[in-house]
């Protein structure tokens, strides 16, 4: 499998220039862009999304977790997916069938940085189990979060917040117990 260093060598440019071409950087001459693109096409080069995610610090993937799939979920998923895709995100759907360990598998994907956020439609694990994972990324739950007599706010992240850049996104604490 080709990499940008091989492409650079064959095109007679630097690997930075190849990166600029791949990412549509505006300050590349048309002749250079064409030369690099011809090598990319000839080698059938496709960027490694794992490497891109690692470099950028995000996967652009949001998980939706539900115990089952029904018409109401389908409507939500359709609308959410359209909005997410407008902002460069994709959706992964996790159907748990009410099995607690299936929810934990989705949470582990968040912890391992394979997802950028999770949306729980209906969850079976208690918030006390899920709360530990909030340090790995935004978690939305439609169900009330009861934090036993603690005065910390819980986070309810809006779809807009999930779909914006994490570095400029400030989740809103909308309720406290």
Image: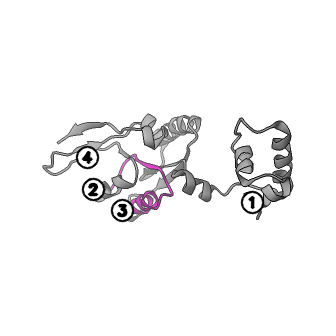
Front position among marks 3 and 4: 4
170 horizontally vs 173: left or right? right
* N-term mark: 3 or 2: 3
How far apart marks 1 and 3 lie (CA) works out to 45 Å
121 horizontally vs 90: left or right? left
Q: Can you say whether 138 is above or below 3 in the image? A: above
Q: Which mark is residue 126?
A: 2
Circle 1 sits on which residue? 5
Residue at the image point whose x is 51% and y is 41% from the top: 77
**Pointers 1 and 3 in contact (C-beta within 8 Å):** no
Q: Which mark is residue 100?
A: 3
55 horizontally vs 175: left or right? right
* N-term mark: 1 or 3: 1
Identify which residue, 51 or 124, lies in the foreground.
51
Q: Quadrant of residue 104?
A: bottom left
Q: Can you say whether 72 is above or below 149 in the image? A: above
Secondary structure of the residue carrying tag 2 is: loop
Q: Which mark is residue 145?
A: 4
Secondary structure of the residue carrying tag 1 is: helix
Secondary structure of the residue carrying tag 3 is: helix
* N-term mark: 1 or 2: 1
Badge 4 crowding class, 10 Å Cα cut-off, few under 14, some 14 to 19, many 20 or more, is some
């Amino acid at each position: 499998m080709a990499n940008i260093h091989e492409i650079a060598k064959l095109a007679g440019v630097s690997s930075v220039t190849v990166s600029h071409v791949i990412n549509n950087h505006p300050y590349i001459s048309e002749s250079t862009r064409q030369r690099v693109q011809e090598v990319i096409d000839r080698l059938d080069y496709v960027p490694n999304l794992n490497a891109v995610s690692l470099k950028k610090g995000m996967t652009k993937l949001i998980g939706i977790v539900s115990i089952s799939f029904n018409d109401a979920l389908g409507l939500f998923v359709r609308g959410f997916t359209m909005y997410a895709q407008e902002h460069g995100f994709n959706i992964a759907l996790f159907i748990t069938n009410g099995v607690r360990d299936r929810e934990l598998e989705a949470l582990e994907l968040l912890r391992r940085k394979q997802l950028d956020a999770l949306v729980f439609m209906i969850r079976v694990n208690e918030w006390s189990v899920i709360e530990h994972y909030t340090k790995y990324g935004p978690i939305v739950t439609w169900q009330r979060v009861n934090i036993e007599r603690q005065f910390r706010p819980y986070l309810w992240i809006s779809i807009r917040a999930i779909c914006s850049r994490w570095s400029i996104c400030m989740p809103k604490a909308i309720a406290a117990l």
